[in-house]
Each structure stands twice: as structure tokens, then as C-alpha cells.
Image: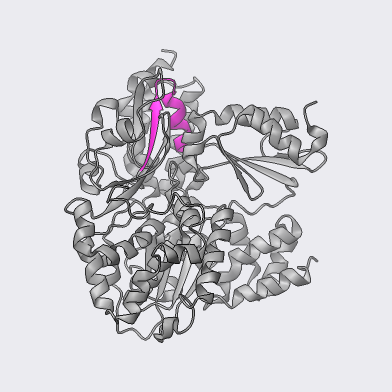
């Protein structure tokens, strides 16, 4: 197995969710070592900072820095929320991490909570994750019985409760402050920042929110050291990333690659290129919120900054590959329908803008479009960006502009005159 | 006036212990109430508000905001077909059409015998195995019209293709 394989190391074993098996493969070793060798929380946070572990949910904020923002002298309880509300179209990595290696996640949760001084962790899981819920709940129960979670863990005096909280179907709850409101039983409306969740998060208390993949990487950092972890990736993006590739490729699936791997390599080598007898038309590189790329634009390293410089985003690392059979106006209609459906309704530019863009996209797709519709989209889309509490509107705006500009001819071809 | 069955009531009360504020148990308790009542109507909302001792309007806000809560009956087998990009380009529309034809209903409808309902949903996070759908809590992937026939036949032998 290549040395860079970390979080998917045990994906090949169907028995990995069983605690005894996981223990025999080394899971929880770092957690036990931290407790027995009395490694300090500061040392853990520093290791994660050195590792350049970045938030793997899409935003890419450095995890160690985020943890460092949590005040240590507060009388309030602190919370960890693990973001398992996977919903970005094209993304299926967190489902795999939850189903295939739940103890790796729990070890990451335990280390994170110890480092930040947290005694309650909520795993906010999307409501449709029935199998992941069952698997992770069993893992929590088993780990508690084994004294790896719960009260006075391994005789250290450290307590940690891990609680699964099921969502109920709302993409917006993957946005961290919407997640907090949802956890509190409210509508999933994003909150204005500041205050940031590190200071005022769940139940008004300091809160760390990290994606499943981010937390799953933590035990590996403690195992190999922050520096070695960082070196697998690039200067600013340490370690590996899970890339999910779907659509018209030979080998759709989930691949763990070093940060900085060229997108071209993911599509053509790792996933085997476009299915037989077909030609590549476009790639949506990091989930449907990331601007579409044409075949001659794929020579970009998969890392946060380089993707932004290329006018798109790394996002959640979920590439959707489209061949020549795909109707771009149909993809645009489906894409904009999603944001119109999922806008939480709090901010006017997003609520109205996503709906309008969807209506125009549908009109074009149904063959009733006129060329001025394309200019209307280009006029409208920038109004959704930076005018709202959260980035959901912007997540449609940038892809809408890119798809209309790059495939204008195909859109015009669907119009009468 | 609806009331939750005793076992569900006990399960619901246990959720209140998991959070520093009781309101946080609302989503999990609404899930339980939906299992108990089949769907969440005005009376179900009131029953949850009563149990949790919170205002009915807070229950209403959540039950109407989150898409997984249904406000009228759904089928015994609720089929949620993904309609997002990856599934669409792999043939989700054909799958949906086939389901509708086989069951004789439109999306967001229930068959007359109450057995099946079909709902179009957004991404369910298994994009590499599309087209995909959930039937109640079970995930089905790499769907074809033949697989759909098989699933329907297994769930309801009277609808099996002879």
C-alpha cells in the first residue's frame, strides 16, 4: 500500500467497524498514548498546526488554528460538533468514513476533545444516514464499554460523551452556524459572524466544528508527527484528501491522494479516464458549488489556493465528470434547482436569486429561452455573492457564471433565434 | 388530540437528557413522532410541544423547515429517488419514469393501497453508485429498470411481473 494512504488504510476490511479488530490494527493507540504519556493539549494543538491539516468540508480553514481560537479560561462548557451533514452534490466521502472506519473517527474525536478541553461531542449527521448512524452508534457503545470513551477514560480522570444528533433534511445545515441552530432545535438558519463559534457556538458556549474527514486525520498526525503529515501534501495543505469521483469515468469511486495531486491525474489515471468510446466534455471539480472546468483546464494541483487561482475551488474534493452525451443546460437546470430548493429563506438575495436563476435555467432547458436570458443570469448572479449571511447564494452564483460563459454556444443552440 | 405511544414517549424523554437545553431534542423527537404517527400534522406538532413543554410554534417551525418531516401520509414503502447531477447523468430520470409507470403514480403521490410513495430528493451522498434511491432506511444503488422491478416485486409480491 502506498505510504500516503492514511484515513482509508483500513477501508478494505469489512470487519474494521468491530472494536476488537480495530484495536488489533492499531486504532486508539494514539489516544491511549496521549493519556498514558500525559501529552499536553498544547503539544497536540501544535502538532496539528504543524501538520497544516485543513478543514476538509470545503472551506479549508486550518484545523489547529481553529482549535487555538477556543478560550481556555472560560467557565462555560465547551463543545465539539463533528459535521457529518454531508450534502454537497457529488460528495460521498464522509458516508464512507462513518461506515467503514467509525473507530478512527472516534479516536480523532477523543484526541480533539482532549486537546481543546471538551467533554461533550455531538456528531451532527444528516438524517438520511441510517446505516452510518447504526454503525457509529454501535462503535460509540463498544468504545464506552472498553473504557475508551465515557467517564474517567483509562483512569485519566478525563470524561467524554459522544452523542449522535440526526438532522432532518436540509443542505444548509452543513454550514457551521446553521448546524448550530439546527442542533439547538431551531430552523437551520445561518448566524451572522462574528461572534465565531469558537467563542459563541452551541448553546452559547465555545464550540469547535470540524468535518468528519478532518477529525479522522487527527490520529494519523499524532502517529506520524505533524511534520511528516504536512510533507505528504503541499506547503499549505498538509496530508492527504479524499477525492470522490462520479459520473462518466471508467472507475468512479473514492480515492485518497496527497494534497496537490493534479486534477488531470485524478480524472485520467486514478479514475481511468472517460468511459469507453466517449469524449470528455467538462469536469465539476469539487462538488456542485465549484465552477465547471473544460477539458483544457484540468492541469491544476488539487489544493485550496491553486484551485482558487484557476477560478474554481477545491471544495469537498468531489469531481463530477461529464462526457459528450451530457446536456449542459440540463446540468445547469438540475444544479440551480438544488440551490433554489435548499436556500433557507433568511436572506432576500439568496432566496429570490436562486429561485430566479432556477426559473431561467428551466425555461432555457424547456426550449423557451432567448439569448437575453443568458445576460440576465450574468447580471443577476453577482448579486447573490457577498450580500447574504452565508455563502449558499455564492455557491450557485460562481458556478452559474462559469457555466454560462464557458458553454454559451450550447445554451444558444437550444434557443429558437 | 394525538398522544405519543408509551414506549416512544419514554424514548423521547430520554433524548431530553442528552442536551443542556431541552429544545435541542426537538429534531430527534420529531423523528420519533413521525415513526409513531406516520406523519407530522398539526396534532402531532401539538403532542410534541406538550411532551417537551415548549411552544407549539417552535415545533411548527422545525417540522416545516426540514424536508424529512411529512405532513400527510406516505406509503408503507417510501421511495426517495435522487435527482441531482451525478445521478441525473447516469439515468435518474429513466429510473423515476419507470417507477412512476410501474406504480401508476406521479412523484410526491401515494398508491391507492397505501403501499408505495415516490419522492424526488436531492443528493443522498452515494454519487459514485448512481442512480440511487432510498426505500425507507435502505439504500439502493446502480439502479436499472430491471432492479426497480425486482425491488418492487420483493416488497409487494402482488406487483411482481409474471
Instruction: Residue A285: say if magenta.
Output: no
Q: Is residue B69 above or below residue B85?
A: below
Total count of labels:
0
Left or right of A137 on screen, residue A327: left
Does residue A346 show up? Answer: no
Residue at figure coordinates x 34%, y 43% from the top left: A383
**Who is closer to the viewer here, A308 or A134?**
A134
Residue at figure coordinates x 48%, y 24% from the top left: A365
Residue B34 is situated, as x and y percent measured from the top left of the image, at 69, 58
Residue A260 is situated, as x and y percent measured from the top left of the image, at 23, 45
Q: Is residue B44 above or below residue A256?
A: below
Residue A400 is drawn in which quadrant?
top left
Residue A28 is situated, as x and y percent measured from the top left of the image, at 40, 69
Region rendered in magenta = A318-336
Residue B125 is situated, as x and y percent measured from the top left of the image, at 49, 45
Left or right of B26 on screen, residue A319: left
Q: Is residue A115 above or below residue A364?
A: below
Extreme residue toward the front, this view: A24
Residue A417 is drawn in which quadrant?
top left
Left or right of A130 on screen, residue A121: left
**Who is closer to the viewer here, A241 or A272?**
A272
Extreme residue toward the left, this view: A235
**Who is closer to the viewer here, A269 or A16?**
A16
Instruction: Residue A323: say if magenta.
Output: yes
Residue at figure coordinates x 72%, y 36% from the top left: B152
Q: Is residue B161 above or below residue A77?
A: above
**Who is closer to the viewer here, B23 or B14?**
B14
Does residue A121 show up? Answer: yes
Residue at figure coordinates x 44%, y 66% from the top left: A23
Residue A219 is drawn in which quadrant?
bottom left
Amino acid at each position: 500500500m502506498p505510504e500516503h494512504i492514511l484515513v482509508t488504510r483500513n477501508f478494505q476490511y469489512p470487519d474494521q467497524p468491530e472494536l476488537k479488530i480495530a484495536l488489533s490494527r492499531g486504532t486508539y493507540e494514539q489516544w491511549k498514548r496521549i493519556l498514558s504519556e500525559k501529552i499536553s493539549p498544547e503539544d497536540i494543538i501544535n502538532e496539528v498546526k504543524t501538520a497544516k491539516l485543513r478543514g476538509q468540508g470545503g472551506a479549508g480553514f486550518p484545523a489547529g488554528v481553529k482549535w487555538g481560537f477556543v478560550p481556555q479560561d472560560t467557565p462555560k462548557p465547551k463543545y465539539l460538533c463533528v459535521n457529518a451533514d454531508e450534502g454537497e452534490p457529488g460528495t460521498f466521502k464522509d458516508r464512507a468514513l462513518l461506515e467503514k472506519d467509525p473507530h478512527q473517527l472516534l479516536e480523532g474525536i477523543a484526541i480533539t476533545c482532549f486537546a481543546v478541553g471538551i467533554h461533550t461531542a455531538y456528531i451532527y449527521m444528516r438524517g438520511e444516514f441510517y446505516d452510518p448512524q447504526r454503525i457509529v452508534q454501535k462503535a460509540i457503545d463498544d468504545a464506552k464499554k472498553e473504557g475508551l470513551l465515557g467517564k474517567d477514560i483509562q483512569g485519566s480522570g478525563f470524561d467524554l460523551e459522544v452523542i449522535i444528533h440526526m438532522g432532518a433534511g436540509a443542505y444548509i445545515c452543513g454550514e457551521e452556524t446553521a448546524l448550530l441552530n439546527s442542533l439547538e432545535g431551531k430552523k437551520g438558519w445561518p448566524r451572522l459572524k462574528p461572534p465565531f463559534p469558537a467563542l459563541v457556538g452551541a448553546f452559547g458556549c465555545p464550540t469547535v466544528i470540524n468535518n468528519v474527514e478532518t477529525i479522522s486525520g487527527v490520529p494519523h498526525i499524532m502517529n506520524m508527527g505533524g511534520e511528516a503529515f504536512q510533507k505528504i501534501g503541499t506547503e499549505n495543505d498538509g496530508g492527504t484528501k479524499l477525492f470522490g469521483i462520479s459520473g462518466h469515468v471508467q472507475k468512479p469511486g473514492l480515492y485518497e491522494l496527497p494534497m496537490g495531486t493534479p486534477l488531470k491525474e485524478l480524472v485520467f489515471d486514478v479514475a481511468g479516464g472517460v468511459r469507453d468510446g466517449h469524449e470528455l466534455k467538462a469536469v465539476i471539480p469539487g462538488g456542485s458549488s465549484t465552477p465547471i472546468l473544460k477539458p483544457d483546464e484540468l492541469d491544476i494541483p488539487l489544493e485550496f489556493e491553486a484551485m482558487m487561482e484557476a477560478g474554481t475551488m477545491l471544495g469537498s474534493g468531489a469531481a463530477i465528470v461529464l462526457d459528450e452525451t451530457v446536456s449542459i443546460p440540463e446540468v445547469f437546470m438540475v444544479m440551480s434547482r438544488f440551490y433554489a430548493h435548499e436556500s433557507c429563506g433568511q436572506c432576500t438575495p439568496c432566496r429570490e436569486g436562486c429561485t430566479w436563476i432556477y426559473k431561467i435555467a428551466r425555461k432555457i432547458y424547456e426550449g423557451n429561452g432567448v439569448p437575453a436570458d443568458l445576460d440576465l443570469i450574468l447580471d443577476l448572479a453577482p448579486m447573490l455573492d457577498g450580500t447574504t449571511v452565508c455563502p449558499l447564494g455564492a455557491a450557485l452564483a460562481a458556478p452559474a457564471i462559469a457555466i454560462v460563459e464557458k458553454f454559451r454556444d450550447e445554451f444558444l443552440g437550444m434557443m429558437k433565434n | 388530540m394525538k398522544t405519543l405511544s408509551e414506549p416512544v414517549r419514554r424514548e423521547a424523554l430520554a433524548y431530553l437528557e442528552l442536551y443542556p437545553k431541552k429544545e435541542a431534542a426537538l429534531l430527534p423527537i420529531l423523528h420519533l413522532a413521525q415513526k409513531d404517527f406516520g406523519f407530522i400534522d398539526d396534532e402531532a406538532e401539538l403532542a410534541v410541544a406538550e411532551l417537551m413543554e415548549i411552544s407549539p410554534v417552535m415545533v411548527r417551525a422545525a417540522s416545516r423547515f426540514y424536508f424529512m418531516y411529512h405532513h400527510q401520509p406516505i406509503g408503507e414503502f417510501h421511495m426517495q429517488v435522487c435527482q441531482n447531477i451525478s445521478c441525473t447523468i447516469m439515468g435518474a430520470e429513466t429510473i423515476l419514469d419507470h417507477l412512476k409507470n410501474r406504480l401508476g403514480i406521479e412523484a410526491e403521490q401515494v398508491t391507492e393501497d397505501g403501499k408505495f410513495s415516490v419522492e424526488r430528493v436531492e443528493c443522498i451522498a452515494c454519487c459514485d453508485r448512481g442512480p440511487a434511491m432510498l426505500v425507507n432506511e435502505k439504500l439502493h444503488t446502480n439502479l436499472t429498470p430491471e432492479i426497480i422491478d425486482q425491488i418492487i416485486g420483493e416488497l409487494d409480491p402482488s406487483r411482481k411481473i409474471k
